[in-house]
Image (spheres, rainbow, N blue to C red):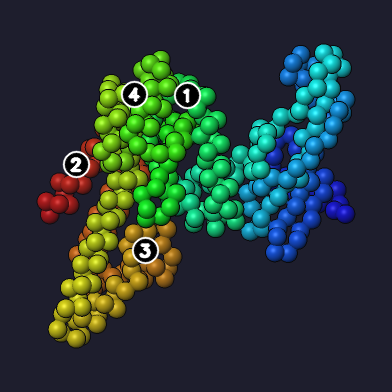
Amino acid sequence: MASNSELALMTKLLDLEGMKVRNYSITPGIGVLIALESQDPKVSCPHCGKKTDKLHQNREYTVRDLPLAQQSVYLKVNRRRLKCLNCHKVFAEEFEWVKKKKTYTTRLKNKILQELQDSDLKSVAQRNEVSEQEIETMLKDWGEELKTKKPQGIKRLGIDEIALVKGQKNYCAVLVDLDQKVVVGILPKRTKAAIRQHLESWGEPVLSQIQEVSIDLWKPYYTVVKEVIPHAEIVADRFHVMKQVNEELDAARKKTKRAAQKNKKKTERESVLQGITHSKYVLLKNESELSELEKEKLAQVKSVAPNLGKMHQLKEKFRQVFQDSNHWQEGLLSLGILITFEFAA
C-alpha cells in the first residue's frame, strides 16, 4: 500500500482537476494502473444546483491516459451516480478530463490528434501504444461531437489534414480555430464537397466573422474557401510553405549525390559522397536544434557541397522570418530584404 506522501506526489504528477490518487500499482510490461477518486465528496446536481453526497451507485471503469515516465498509464475511474436530496433525481458526476463512455482521457485524444497532423495513423498508434482502431474511433467520436457545435467568435480558421494510411492519400480534414488553438471540426473525408457541407452548416453568422483562412497549397481548399467564405483572406500555411522549402533542399541533396556518383575523379567523388552521406536530417532539421555531432556533419556538408550550404543558409533565414514576424507586413518586409540581398548577390 502506497504511503500518503507517495499518493500526494502521484496526484500532483497526474494533475487531473478535482481528482486524487487513491492507490496505484506498476506491472512490468503493461504499465501503471492508478485508482482515482474525487477530492470533493459532494457534487452539484445538474438539475437544481444543490450539492449532494448521497451515493446511488458506483460505476468503475478503466481509461487510457498520457504515458508517465515512459510507462503506459491506465486510470481506474469511479464515476459515481448520486441522488439529489433536494429534487430527488439521480445523476452521474461529470469529469472534464474524460467524457462519458470514453475509454481515453481528453488530453490523450488531443496529443494523438496533434501527432496525426505530422504523421500517419499507424505510426502514431505504435508511438502511443494504442490500436489503429482506437484512434479511428477517437476521430469518429470527436467528429460527431463537433458536428453539433458551432464555433463561437472564430476569426482565423485553419484547414489541414490527417494521413490515415501513409502514402495512400487517405486523409481526414481538420478545421482549427487558430486563435483559440482548438479543433472545431473533423471530417472523415477531405473532399471539397465534405468541407463545403461542414462550413455551410455553421451558418452565415459564424462564417461572416471569419477574416482569414490558413490552408496548405491544395487547390480544392482554396476553391471551397473562395466559394463559401469569399470575404476571408486566404493565406498559405507556414508549415506547408516550409515543407516545400525543405523538399527543394532535399531534392538538391539528391541531385548533388547523383552528380558526385558520376564524377570520374575518385578523390573528389569519395570526398563529396562521404560528406553528404546521412546528411538529410541534418540539412532539414532546425539548425538551433542540432546536436554537436550534427553540427559537425553540417559543417562537413558545407565544405564538400557549397551549393547545399548556401541553400541551407537560405532555408534557415526563411524560417527565421516566420519565427520572428508578429504581423504579415513585418514578415513581407523581411522577405523582401532577404530576396534583395541574398538572391541578388
Whichever of labels 2 and 4 marks the residue nearer the N terminus, that label is: 4
Marks 3 and 4, the one that precedes in the sequence: 4
Camera-nearest residue between 162 and 134: 134
The quarter holding residue 145 reads top right
> How far apart are the alpha carbons under marks 1 and 3?
39 Å
Disc 3 marks which amino acid? Tyr
| Residue at 24% over, 67% down | 254
Circle 1 Cα neighbour tier, 10 Å, few/some/many (<14 / 14–19 / ≥20): some
Residue 211 is labelled as 4
For residue 5, above or below residue 198: below
Q: Whole-percent x and y of residue 37?
A: 80, 39
* Residue 208 screen position, x and y as percent: 36, 17
Residue under numbered circle 1: 151
Amino acid carrying mark 2 in the image: Gly
Q: Which residue is mark 3?
A: 281
Find residue 336 and name its label: 2
Q: Seen in the image, is 1 located left or right of residue 124?
A: right
Of the numbered discs 2 and 1, the one sitting upstream in the chain is: 1
Q: Is residue 269 toward the left or the right of residue 165 in the image?
A: left
Amino acid tagged 4: Gln
x and y, in percent, of residue 76 in the image: 76, 45
Nearer to us of marks 2 and 4 is 4
Q: Quadrant of residue 138?
A: top right
